[in-house]
Amino acid sequence: MSNFGDLIRIAREEKGLFLRQVAAELDIDQAIISKFERNERKPTKEQVLKFAKFYKLDKETLLVEWLSDKVAYDLKDENLADKVLKAAEQKIKYKKK
Amino acid sequence: MSNFGDLIRIAREEKGLFLRQVAAELDIDQAIISKFERNERKPTKEQVLKFAKFYKLDKETLLVEWLSDKVAYDLKDENLADKVLKAAEQKIKYKKK
DNA sequence: ATTACATTTGACCAGTTTTGTCAAAACACA
DNA sequence: TGTGTTTTGACAAAACTGGTCAAATGTAAT
């Protein structure tokens, strides 16, 4: 199962960059990026988009990864997760109309 | 499409109670309950359980309503909602193992 | 229109959580 | 040991939440 941290760590390693370099480029403290890569902290949406652009990753893929991490985290203690997701789906569908 | 606010408003009206009375009984400010009923504020989990008990509503139903409101709210601006929910479902399944 | 009561609104505060900064500690390895 | 990278943790600033209260608004009866 993938997650946001893995995606950006792999992307960075593939490009052979150091945290320091990415930090300078994106203007985000390298300690924070280290935490993002280990899923210890959640980035903001703006940061997600910065990573997508810089690493040339698909924006949508990265956003989905990030948002689903968040949702999964919110529901982590809930044994009702399945029902909740189904109900949420209905609500979102309904709102679209 | 139902939501948490509607459920507790209907329950209160069926019992013919005023906000003031419910507020006193549950020890929650009546202004806040008013906001819960209009979905202007989200209650805490403890408050959800208080309502379930007081109105004799099914705990699980109310919790699902509350959590799915929250998830739907988080995804309200995202046209990726479907993908996000599917991904979140996988992540939750995966974690259970 | 005035009274009486219920609900809603909005300003404010306090406590919590989130985000960012930094330097020191830990790690890797020549 | 020395050099460079990553991780950790303490701290502060900013953003978000939840609660309190009083004033404003709504509603119905007289």
Image (cartoon, coloured by chain):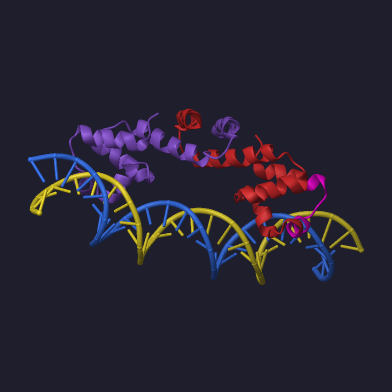
Chain colours: A purple, B red, C blue, D yellow
Residue B10, position as x, y percentages in the image: 75, 43
Q: In the displayed structure, does residue A16 sit left or right of residue B41?
A: left
- Name the image quarter holding residue A63: top left
Q: Please report the bounds of the magenta region as a residue range.
A: B12-24
| Magenta segment, prevailing SS (helix, strand or loop) | helix
Q: How many marks?
A: 0
Any part of residue A97 in sight: no
**Residue A74 at least partly seen:** yes
- Is A57 within the magenta? no
Residues A8 and B70: in front is A8
Residue B97 x/y as whole percent? 49, 29
Quadrant of the frame with the C terminus of chain A:
top right
For image coordinates 68% across by 54% down, the residue present is: B33
Left or right: B70 with respect to A55?
Answer: right
Quadrant housing the N terminus of chain A: top left
At x 33%, y 34%, the residue is: A59
Reply above or below: A28 against B3.
Answer: below
Does residue A18 appear left or right of residue A80 in this picture? left
Q: Position of residue A57 (x, y in %)?
A: 29, 32
Which residue corresponds to the image point at 62% horizontal and 42% vertical from the top-left?
A: B66
Q: Residue at x 32, y 41 (%)?
A: A37
Above-or-below relation of C11 to A40:
below
Q: Position of residue C30 (x, y in %)?
A: 7, 40
Residue A62 in the figure: left or right of residue D4: right
The part of the image, by quadrant, that contains residue D9 is bottom left
Residue A17: name its quadrant.
Answer: top left
